[in-house]
Image (spheres, rainbow, N blue to C red):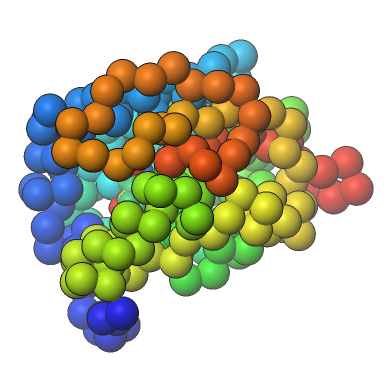
């Protein structure tokens, strides 16, 4: 696998136009709708403000009424700001917000790109209000979609070459070690990867067969924030 050096800008910085344009492709539109349908019910009932960490170009933030966002890369934040999302450049490892600020903190396809996922989850927990929800969405490592993205990374895809994918169990254990407990799960993309994906309903539960899994978490009772 080709790794970039720490000094090299990530593809999210240098290719933000290409990343954002994918959402307007025929496949991008279908996959985005499938993923939104998995995410939405787990955010229902959470209030404002909401924070997305690793917001990218803000497509999900806009659709899910997430008003505040952070990303380590500058370039995608310009797109997110243009979509009406408040943006801050920063890292999930050191969020620029006081304790207990948000009703929901959302991480979509971001944990696999961060250097220190446990620190990012601990920071997300810190900025949650009592009773708030952490929503974590990811592509399971051994799902057909995860295997496909890993193969693309090995072939030099500039986005996926830096990703470190995990299984559902690994993410669940990471969350528990970081002081949050999973309370609800939804999954979608049981269809195999193809250039022409089709609309698919999300299902309750989580599975390594699914290409997109969403976990909703609350702060663990034994943890003091
Ligand atoms: C695959 S994109 C996901 C963007 C958006 N959530 C979406 O689903 O379209 C991952 C994003 O995480 C950001 N990122 C990577 N490491 C980060 C970190 N340590 N802190 C904050 N953002 C980070 C990248 O710059 C990128 O915009």
Please say whether residue 103 is visible from this viewpoint: no
Coordinates of residue 200 in the picture (x, y in percent): 38, 20
Q: Is residue 32 above or below residue 19?
A: above
- Name the foreground residue: 75 vs 118: 118
Q: Residue at x 30, y 64 (%)?
A: 151
Coordinates of residue 78 in the picture (x, y in percent): 17, 45
Q: For residue 162, what is the image quadrant? A: bottom left
Q: Is residue 14 above or below residue 60?
A: below
Taking the image as shown, residue 130 lies to the left or right of residue 203, namely right
Q: Residue at x 57, y 28 (%)?
A: 186
Q: Residue at x 20, y 71 (%)?
A: 155
Q: For residue 32, what is the image quadrant? A: top left
- Name the foreground residue: 16 vs 94: 16
Q: For residue 46, what is the image quadrant? A: top right
Coordinates of residue 105 in the picture (x, y in percent): 54, 38
Q: Is residue 187 above or below residue 37?
A: below
Please say whether residue 153 is visible from this viewpoint: yes
């Amino acid at each position: 696998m080709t790794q970039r050096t720490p000094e090299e800008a990530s593809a999210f910085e240098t290719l933000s136009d290409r990343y954002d344009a994918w959402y307007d492709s025929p496949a991008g539109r279908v996959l985005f709708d499938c993923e939104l349908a998995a995410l939405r019910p787990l955010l229902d009932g959470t209030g404002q403000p909401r924070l997305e960490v690793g917001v990218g170009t803000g497509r999900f933030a806009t659709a899910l009424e997430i008003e505040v966002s952070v990303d380590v890369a500058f370039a995608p934040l310009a797109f997110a700001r243009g979509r009406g999302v408040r943006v801050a450049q920063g890292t999930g490892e050191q969020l620029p917000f006081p304790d207990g600020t948000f009703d929901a903190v959302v991480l979509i396809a971001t944990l696999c790109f961060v250097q220190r996922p446990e620190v990012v989850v601990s920071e997300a927990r810190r900025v949650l209000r009592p009773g708030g929800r952490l929503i974590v969405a990811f592509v399971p490592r051994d799902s057909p979609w995860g295997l496909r993205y890993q193969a693309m990374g090995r072939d030099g895809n500039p986005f996926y070459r830096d990703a470190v994918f995990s299984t559902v169990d690994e993410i669940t254990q990471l969350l528990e070690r970081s002081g949050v407990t999973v309370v609800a799960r939804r999954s979608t993309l049981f269809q195999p990867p193809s250039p022409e994906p089709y609309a698919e309903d999300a299902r309750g539960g989580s599975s390594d067969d699914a290409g997109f899994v969403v976990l909703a978490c609350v702060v663990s009772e034994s943890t003091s924030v």
